[in-house]
Image (spheres, rainbow, N blue to C red):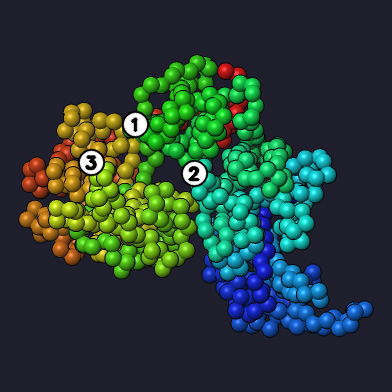
Amino acid sequence: MKKSYIGISIVTDIDTTKWEFGRKVLETFCETDPRLVPDGFDYALGEKIKRPFYDIAACEKYWAMEAIIDSGYGRTFTKWGCGWKRSKAVKYRYTIRHTLVNQLNELRPGWLSGDADANRKIDWIRLFHRLVELANPQFAILHLFTDIETRRRAFGEDHHAIVAADHFLAGPPAAVLEDEGIPNLGWATFFGREYTKEIDAEKLRANGFAVEAIGDGHLVTLTENIFDVADNFPLFSARRAELKKLLRPGFIRLTNEPLATELPENSTPRHATPPDPDNTGKPAGMIGGNSGVSLSLDSTFKAQLQIAAATKAPYALLVTPLNQVISKELWDRVHEVQGTVYQINPPETIETIRILKRPKSAMRVPYIKISIVTDIDTTKWEFGRKVLEAFYETDSRLAPSRLDSDAKIWKLFRGVAACEKYWAKEGIINANKSGRGRVSVKWDCGWTRSEAVEYRYDMIHTMVNQFGELRPGWLKGDADADRKIDWRRLFHRLVELANPQFAILHLFTDIETRDDAFGADEHAIIATDDFLMGPPAAILKDRGIPNLAWATFFGREYTQEIDAEKLRANGFAVEAMGDGHLVTLTKNIFDVADNFPLFSARRSELKKLLRPGFIRLTNEPLNQATSPPVDFGPRYAPLLNGSWVIPTMRG
């Protein structure tokens, strides 16, 4: 069984022999991640790379060494290709076969290719994206190869499938592309100017694919994360099959998908065959679900529901006692495709009950909430740059993976400087149906991270409306409650930048997020919702502060409410910052999870030191123990491990 590996193949007709290009290629490896710095670099392909790597400058003389070849046609001047490797983690080997013009004056494109250990800590799409920007390729792929695709005759027994599969695994180089065509789609595939007529970017985007214009071509990615190829091959396979159907028949040589069998040890078989839209028979039913506490419209559910919509296959979302929350977006999308939601009873029975009301709030995975309301001009790039730097510099695990002015956040993060044009992108909206009331605006933006630590933050910009009224800006977001991150440091820097009217940093656990946590009356329910939300400026103005968080910043609007000396005298940490005060309740934010009674007591004590009615919620939630997870056993393992299946049931 072959070890999984990351394959990169880039075919380009630019002059790869120039050191300016070579230097930037090597810098890309070194700057993407220290674990990609080579330890060997040498000229002459096919030979062992013997020379140690000292620094990039020392590689110049080996990048495209001149040579003379004696042949029956005389002496030919050429330039050797070269290679670089790393023998430690992350192990890899890459080579460059240089672009050249042969004796017949024909251009032979260059080929940068290589394999690397499939290390999950490396940002492979960032490396690939930068190489594509440098090479402006004719064609390029980035793919995670696993034993599902690399085993013998994975794509079929016929000669055509075997040859095309070999070409897919090899790269492919320019000669194969010219003579045979594109063998298959990788997780990320770049189509250069030679394929302009083949790629309808808007059509692909309309069908849910990420398509980014780069140089003279388009980069198409199939799922959100390259490791979906290993973790959820049925999802990846379904997305690839769907994309092929949107392209010209025959454009991609391999039409079959491999069977997801003979998987690595300790993994669960998760094969799925996407329903055939042209099949006149009644479509098979589809079941979706996973073991998460909170179910949301993630990439897996999106793929399932897209297929259900296209094939009209009956769709059922199966909910277990492990699932406590279903997002409104997922709930609505299931019903858009005429799907149904069922609750499965404990595993000793197979009885299911249809659910007609969405489970909204119950146990939730702990998460960190930041909410900052400010009246400074957030549209200025100077502010935006410092905000993004605060994330990046607080911890490298907070570096964004995407940033965009689009609500779906498509664009990959390429460094802080590259984000300027998206931070407060100018736009025009029609204020009335006639189109005559056009208003110039600056779009809000958001940034996400899909790896650990997962998060999403949005910047809703400060603006002055048509009535001359200031609408404060709102920086808000949720993140995984990772204990290795210095959340207070991040929040402190953001508060220094924004000089807010009001801001909170809090760790939300199931104790505070479950139904009726702070009371069953309407006042408590509304105030709880406001607390969980943020709250934004409009709520602060109309209803007041809903609750105290682990760290709460009171700006100049609340100067008369905060007696800093009085609070300090009672043992609370109060720090003067900008025009306000930052108050924290305990030493560590994770006291909220580890010792809620302590945190709750401190919050109650602080409320008593403030003006009655200043904080809307006066009750504290009961620290009730949560139920242990239900062991559903192997019968539901394929469903609960995040996979999805299309069963053989009919009707």
Please provide percent x and percent y for residue 31: 53, 70
- The answer to which of 488 and 222 lies nearer the viewer is 222
Residue under circle 1? 360
Q: Based on the displayed image, in which of its 4 quarters is residue 103 positioned?
A: bottom right
For marks 1 and 2, give the one nearer the viewer. 2
The amino acid marked with disc number 2 is Ala
Q: Residue at x 14, y 47 (%)?
A: 541
Q: Is residue 10 left or right of residue 335?
A: right
Tell me if label 3 and label 2 are in contact, CB under 8 Å: no
Please provide percent x and percent y for residue 273: 65, 33
Of callouts 3 and 1, which one flags the residue occurring earlier in the amino acid sequence? 1
Residue under circle 3? 530
Of callouts 3 and 2, which one flags the residue occurring earlier in the amino acid sequence? 2
Q: Assess disc 2: are there few (<14), some (14-19) or many (≥20) residues with their C-alpha within 10 Å of its C-alpha.
A: few
Residue 176, above or below 55: above
Tell me if label 1 and label 2 are in contact, CB under 8 Å: no
